[in-house]
Amino acid sequence: MASTLPGFRRTCWKAEPGVRLRPVPEQGVCLAYTPARPALHALNVTTWFVLTLCDGRPYAAIARAFRRAAADSLGPGSGTEALRTALHQLRELGLVRCLPSVRPLSEHTT
Amino acid sequence: MNPVLDSPPKITIGVTEACPLRCRHCYADCAHAPKQGEVSAETWIRVLRDLAGRGIIQAYFEGGEPLAKPGFLDILRAITPVMMTLMRTHGIGLDAAMARTLREAGLGRALVDLMGARAATHDDWTGTPGSFDEACAAVRHLVAEGIPTDVLVILTRQTAPELNGILKLAHRLGAERVGVLRLYPMGRAKRAWSEIALPLDAQMKAIAGLRPPEGLTVMQSWHPNDHNCCWQAAAINAFGRAIGCMYLREYVDHGDATVTPYDEIWRDNALYRTIRAGDVEERCGSCSATQGSHGGCRSTAYAWHRRWTAPDPFDTTLNHGIDLARLPSHLLES
């Protein structure tokens, strides 16, 4: 499912404007409101964390940060799939958008 | 004990006690015009913006009829950029133009009350000829505008035989879900109780007989889904009073939420903390397992027993022989 995203690795990821977050750490979720498409979503900890990484940085940088954070809790190789699934969900929910990467990928990866 | 929240993420706003209908069961004892002392639209906007700043991310508007509140659309437009909004309505006057206005204002979800599957039942219940047709048309208009819409029905002696008809009707109209709600002994419902309330076994039979069309979701809170949702409940009535839950409107007053920030009331009011805690005398294991909360609804528990820790008589395992078709005398006296 996640692998159907077009140009997955060649894009930058950014939260949609106006998205409002309300962490509910007592319940292990973050509520996310999308005023452009009015709906309230409950994000689990993984998806919530990935959303915080979507500040306009490219996929490679997000993946690196995600791998570092997930190293203790996910098995080898599972981090990539979890990240892709989370990004796919976030985009489907209207929480993030893909932006074309205007610079060579290598500039973002240092 | 129930789950614990440091502050509430969602709130219900009983925005007015005005309504064009004269429902026989009206919990708020509504009048056609707003009552003396109701919070103004300007004050609601100020209070809601403050709530947004304190972490509230969803507001559920009910009444009365929200569309009967002068300035309601201004409230909606002011708050939808920062809060998910839901509006419970009877659909009176909610034509195509109003549905478009609500969509443009950013309304997130609508919930339309039906009190029967036929005009005769619904209109008799509302005391308003034509109200059934207007409610059905409202669902169609809201759905046509792309506003997710649910239908609500209160389970009574009159609606029980028509529940499956309401499910089919709601599905035909384009509703996503139907919520079947219990009848609460408040307002005019209290005074009409003997005519409209069903004993618990008849309620359970009606719930067991629900046959929703494919694709329609039914929401209901009878055993084994009887939850004690007070742990997360926040509500302000039409007069600006913090009451925790609209179904507690006749039992509690936690303070003036137009003056004191709601999260302070949440934190500091001793009764509010007690009600949220879920410290109950008895619980239903099945309901606790499915809902993650204990003892069932605090409103009906308190209504029958006058104790916040009492078991909810609407739960089959906690009823202990109480006839829900009869009200205890203390409720009729109050």
Image (tube, grey):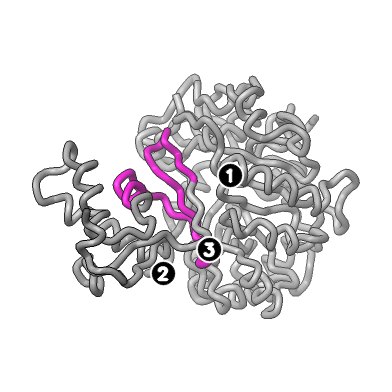
**Which residue is tagged 2?**
B213
Q: Is residue A42 magenta?
A: yes
Badge 2 marks a residue whose secondary structure is: loop
- Residue B188 appears anywhere in the view: no
> Of residues B186 and A73, which is closer to you in this image?
A73
**Which residue is tagged 3?**
A38
- Other residues around mark 2 within 10 Å, as few (<14) / some (14–19) / many (≥20): some
**Quarter of image, res B81:** bottom right
**Looking at the figure, which quarter contains the N terminus of chain A?**
bottom left
Cα distance between the residues tagged 2 and 1: 35 Å
- Other residues around mark 3 within 10 Å, as few (<14) / some (14–19) / many (≥20): many
> Of residues B208 and B297, which is closer to you in this image?
B297
Q: Which mark is residue B56?
A: 1
Residue drawn at x 53%, y 74% as measured from the top left: B146
Badge 1 marks a residue whose secondary structure is: loop
- Other residues around mark 1 within 10 Å, as few (<14) / some (14–19) / many (≥20): many
Q: Amino acid at mark 1?
A: Ile
The location of residue B75, given as percent across then percent down, is: 73, 58
The location of residue B252, given as percent across then percent down, is: 71, 30
